[in-house]
Image (tube, rainbow, N blue to C red):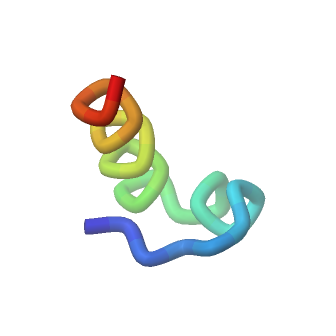
Amino acid sequence: MCQCSNFMLCHRLYECKRLYFRGIKKLK
């Protein structure tokens, strides 16, 4: 899972970014 508090930090890490967006889709 992406433990990045800030979106910008996730954006720098491509893998973390993908997991971040996937997490949002699951929440909605």
Quadrant showing the N terminus: bottom left
Residue sitting nearer the eye, 11 or 22? 22
Q: Position of residue 13 (x, y in %)?
A: 53, 64
Q: Is residue 10 shown left or right of residue 17?
A: right
Q: Is residue 27 above or below residue 28?
A: below
Residue sitting nearer the eye, 11 or 27? 27
Name the residue: 41% across, 60% down: 16
Q: Residue furthest front?
A: 28
Q: Quadrant of residue 3?
A: bottom left
Name the residue: 40% across, 35% down: 24
Q: Quadrant of residue 25?
A: top left
Q: Quadrant of residue 23?
A: top left
Q: Position of residue 19 (x, y in %)?
A: 31, 49
Quadrant showing the C terminus: top left
Name the residue: 37% across, 67% down: 2
Q: Position of residue 20 (x, y in %)?
A: 42, 49
Q: Is residue 8 shown left or right of residue 21?
A: right
Tally of marks: 0
